[in-house]
Amino acid sequence: MEQIQTLSALVNSLRSRGIRRKVAVVCPNDPHTEYVIIRSLREEIAEYLLVTDSAHMDMAWHLWSASPDYIRIYEASTPDDAAALAVQLIRTGEADILMKGLINTDNLLRAVLKKGTGLLPEGGVLSHVAVAQIPLYHKLLFFSDAAVIPRPTLEQYRAMIRNDILVCKAFGNDEPRVALIHCTEKTSEKFPHTLSYVKLKEEAGQGLFGRMFIDGPMDAKTACDKHSGDIKGLSSPVVGNADILIFPNIESGNTFYKTLSLFGDANIAGMLTGTVAPVVVPSRSDSGNSKYYSLALACLVNLRN
């Protein structure tokens, strides 16, 4: 397939396929979630199963009235019950994607991660992938983990890389370039993640991740700016041309996410990976656009699967 280069092209790609994904939304009781639902219905990329608590049924019926052919409503006693019911709808195949509305993320994840009835396979690794369209970068930039994993273990790094590569491939990029992010290019026992980076590169060379390029440790500027790499005497397929940034901890990944959106004028989409179906958990501070593109991202990955 032709590689998707922008987030608007992502939406166009979905529309061209003429397939609506079925999205279970937990507590669609806020203006941003309403915006995402109305816009995606207009763009014909999704249909909805609205799962809400008894106190907020009015909003659900208001949304239903806008497009009754593509919306079903489910009532639960409490937001926690709504989360559990939405997860059940995914498990039974009635919905393809889970999306957070006006419910605390911890409450939603409690249902997602519940053993035996949740969405994370036994032994699976939950991680978060974001994709940013940045005005000053020449292509979409994927990165992890800004929301889930505090201090990745080696196995969690492997899962993050695999998940990000799968998302990249859904965009038509079959040979992504992965940068392992640190503050310098040196490995040191003082920074144990840099030792994990050495192991990850060895495993990549043995074919563990399939077709891809990987390099690091390196800083984010070197990963995305060839001139910086040239000054440092660094040369690799990744330097200045990274598709994926893997961050050493949640603080650096989350700071990068928030900085791009606030100061970099970036549009950013994000979703949880590792689950049996995509899970969209936008931040309360994300814009309507960001939440909409997050839903579109989940629709694309679900089609790929």
Image (cartoon, grey):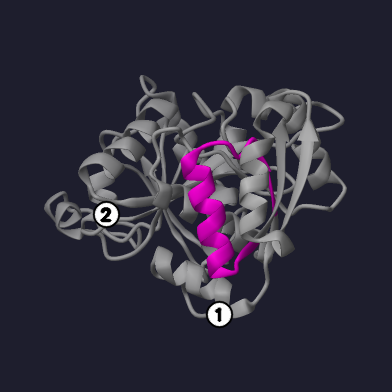
Q: Is residue 31 left or right of residue 266?
A: right
What range of the chain is rendered magenta?
Answer: 23-46
Which residue appears farthest toward the left when viewing the image?
Answer: 231
Kind of residue at disc 1: Met
**Position of residue 65 measured from the top left corner of the image (x, y, whole percent):** 65, 55
User: Looking at the picture, does residue 181 appear above or below residue 93?
Assistant: above
Residue found 42% across the figure and 63% down from its top:
7
**Position of residue 291 measured from the top left corner of the image (x, y, whole percent):** 47, 47
Are the residues flagged by discs 2 and 1 in contact, CB closer than 8 Å?
Answer: no
Kind of residue at disc 2: Cys
Dot 2, crowdedness within 10 Å: few (<14), some or many (≥20)? many
Residue at label 2? 224
Query: What is the quadrant of residue 239 in the picture?
Result: bottom left
User: Looking at the picture, does residue 269 appear above or below residue 116?
Assistant: below
**Position of residue 209 measured from the top left corner of the image (x, y, whole percent):** 59, 55
Residue in front for this viewpoint, 298 or 158: 298
Dot 1, crowdedness within 10 Å: few (<14), some or many (≥20)? few
Q: Nearer the viewer, mark 2 or mark 1?
A: 1
User: Looking at the picture, does residue 16 appear above or below residue 303?
Assistant: below
Residue 165 is at least partly visible in this image:
no
Residue at label 1? 1
